[in-house]
Every structure is written in structure tokens, then in C-alpha cells.
Amino acid sequence: MQLTQLLRNSVGRKLIMAVSGLLVTGFVVSHLLGNLALFAGQEAFNLYAAQLQQLGPLLWLFRLGLAGTLLLHVFFGIWLTLQNRAAKPTGYAINRIRSTNLAAKTMVFTGMALLLFLIGHLLHFTFRRIGLPPELAHDAGGTLDVFDMVTLSFQQGFPVLLYAGAMLALFLHLGHGLGSALQTLGACNDKFLPGVRKGGFIVALALLLGYVSIPVLTFFGFVTP
Amino acid sequence: MNLTLHVWRQKGPEDRGRLERYAARNIDPELSFLEMLDQLNGELIREGREPIVFDHDCREGICGACSQVINGEAHGPQAETTVCQLYMRQFQDGDEIYVEPWRARAFPVIKDLVVDRSALDRLIEAGGYISVGTGGVPDANAILVPGEAAETAMDAAECIGCGACVAACPNGSAMLFVAAKIAHLASLPQGRPEASRRVCSMTDAMGREGFGNCSNHYECEAACPKGISVKFIAQLNREYLKTLPKAATSKAP
């Protein structure tokens, strides 16, 4: 067997989904841990942002790797979903669900929503083209105070709602995805199987609460320099 | 008891098919679901109408032929039960019951409730066996099997190949069926020599037969009349993972 056969095999493609998904989740976790520095105040948060920028080429290597992994995940996710739709051309007149859940059934939709959110998020905080409060817009190209950028952005209602909504999609996506990835990697047996499924939702819930706390607490004025 | 049935009728593979309504009258609650259909068919024949065609064989829950989705559940509402072992006492007088064939691209409808499940046979042909030399009867206990491995293999070997897992899967995937076979053979020493080739060729065959990919909804486990656990899917995935180092170093044929 050749390694290229991985791409032609159903289990092989699922392995790519699982590994790329877990890698991106690793970033999602570290991104949250870094961003929680916002609660440590203006100085700490700006220091964190500056030190990230200082990584230079290493940062770009990481960004490119992450983007490639994510694209792989999106591509294979859509491919697998289209195949699955084709494998079930006719549904039932009556459909009774015994085991699956909303999160599992909406993976492709929450995934797409997250991709759209990611594009918006990059335009917002990385490229600084949209969503910035007017008092910062003129300064967008220059040296921007990252703390001000985040806190002023989240003093507007619409971005807060949008970010919270996207994090709900993240919760659903990871809620099913984490347990599913571990099953695909063969980590489940009699002992772990029920726990892995619940565990995925618990980790996803922790990420949801962590991420949502940033825009929501900022909006209600809990984040001060 | 009196029931209203909505049964899928389809003249042949090319027919579009439709649900038709039937009144099942004076049904004894102690009849099995198939016997209830037999009674209804008797009435249809007496009236000169075409009887409902459905698959059945052993009528004792071990052959896996009675492939019907009843009220949206493969083999009906009772857990770990085939349609022949489902009794009418599970229903209430006056119930409306929908009866549909297995739905999946890999299982084309032949007529009414009968589907062609030979795709499962071709999955077995792809590697669901062990190659043994012919000759004299081997000595008993020549190959020692640990008790735990024998138990695991037996749990997986309970699969009767009915296809309920495919019917219940939102993706029309045969992963639980293949996993049961892979786990059954890979757990035993006799199955080890071909384990790597088996998992690759059987999972390759899944795609060729038009089955979908497993996305871990676990509807299969809930529908399985033999209660095959999705832990065997993880075991299949492990067996597949084990083949990768070999694949990475092997040259193109």
C-alpha cells in the first residue's frame, strides 16, 4: 500500500480530518490562553501582542502552517460531506433520531460559519479593515494600541453579538468534533467511549465560556486599562 | 387491534415508488410484525390486489433478512430486535405505522420493502475472511486464543449482516458492519497474518460500493439488532493506523 492511498480511503481521509482538526483546536486553545491576557490590563496585553510580533519569521511559518492545515480540514470536510449526501440520496418519511445530536448533524454548517467568521475576524483585528470604531480607523495603518483596538471594538453591540454567535458555532463544532476525532484516531474502547463523547462537549464548553467572556465582559465595562 | 399502515410500494428498481395506506384489522397483539404483514397480505390476495413484498427468512432473529424501517427506526422501536422478533404488543390499537425499505445508495430497492444488500457480500469478499490451507483437521488448541480475545471476537462476530447500521446511518455508511468483521478477525490469532491487507481492502471497497463515510453519529449502534458497539469502529481505525508506517516505506508496485 502506498501513502497516497490514504486519500482514496474513507478511513484515511477521516484521519486527515481528525489530525488537522486537532491541530487547529490546539491553536484555538492557545489563542484563548493568550487573549485572556486582556484581563491583566492594557500593559500586559500589549506586551503579549508585541512579543508575538517579535517572533518574526517564526510567526509567519506558524501562520502558514496553520492556514494550510485549516484549508486541508475545510477541503476534506466538504468532500466527505458531499460523499455522505450522495450515499444517502433518499431519506425516510418518518425519521427518528436515537443517538446523534444537533452538533453532529450541523458539522458542515458550523464549519462554514466558522470559516466566514474567521475571514471577518482577520479583516477585523489582523488586517484592520472592518469593525474598528471610527476614532481608531484613521490610525489603522500605523502603530495601533492593540488593547484599545479590542476594547473599543467590543464596546459596540454588533461585534459582540457576532463574536458570541460564532463562538456558539465553535462550541457545536468542537463538541462533536473533539470526541469524533479521538474515535477516528482509535482512542476509544469500552472504558473511554462514553467519556470521550462527553469530554469533547466539556472542553468545547470551556472554550465557549472563555472566548465569550472577552467580548461580553468588555461590553459591560469589566475590562479596564 | 386495528392499525393503519403506510407501506412503501415500488413496482421495481426503476419505479419511483410511493407510500400507500392500508388498514390492518383484527390484529392479534401476539403476532410478530411479519405475521401481521402476512395476515394483511392474505387479505390483499383475497381482494385480488398485489401483496406487499418483503424480505424474511429465519423468523428467529438470526438471519438479518427482515430489512424494514418502522416509524423511522431500523427494525422498529424495540432495541436489539429484528422485525421478525418485534411483536404487535409493542404497538397500541389505532396506531399509524410507517414501513419503509432500507435507504442508502448502496442498497437499491428491488421491490416494495426488499433491497439489494449484496454490497455487504462484496465487502466480505474484499477481505472479510481468513485464508486457510486445506488438509487434515488441525489439532485442537494448536493455536491458543486468550479468553478475553475470544470474548471480544465473539461480541463482534454477533453481526448478522442485516444492514440496519447502513439504514440508520445519516451518511449511509457501512462502517459498523466492516468494523465488526475487522474486529472479529483481528482479535484472533488466525486473523492476524492478513489483518493489515484486510483493513485496507475492506475500507477501500466501502467507497467503491457507494457507502458514505462514518462521521460518528452512532445511529448504527443504536439500531443494531445485535448491539454491536461502536468501540469496534475505533478498533478498525487502530488497525488502519497500524498499516500506515508500512505504507509510508513501501514502494509503488
Image: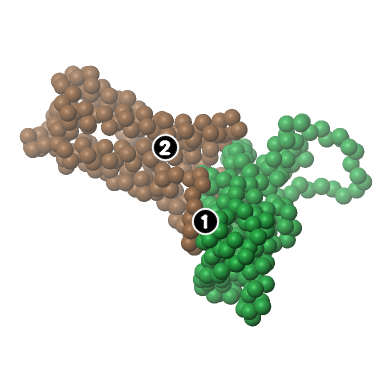
Chain colours: A brown, B green
In percent of width and height, residue B240 lies at 60, 41
Q: Which residue is mark 1?
A: B72
Note whether residue B119 is visible: no
Q: Is B58 positioned to the left or the right of A152 in the image? A: right
Please tell me if label 2 and label 1 are on a single chain: no
Q: Secondary structure at mark 2?
A: helix
Residue contact at pointers 2 and 1, CB within 8 angstroms: no
Mark 2–mark 1 Cα distance, whole angstroms, equals 26 Å
Amino acid marked by disc 1: Gly
Q: Residue at x 35, y 27 (%)?
A: A30
Amino acid marked by disc 2: Gly
Nearer to me, A68 or A204:
A204
For the C terminus of chain A, the image quarter is top left
Q: Write down the quadrant of residue A174 in the picture.
A: top left
Q: Which residue is mark 2?
A: A175
Nearer to me, A99 or B141:
A99
Q: Residue at x 26, y 37 (%)?
A: A164
Which chain does tag 1 point to? B
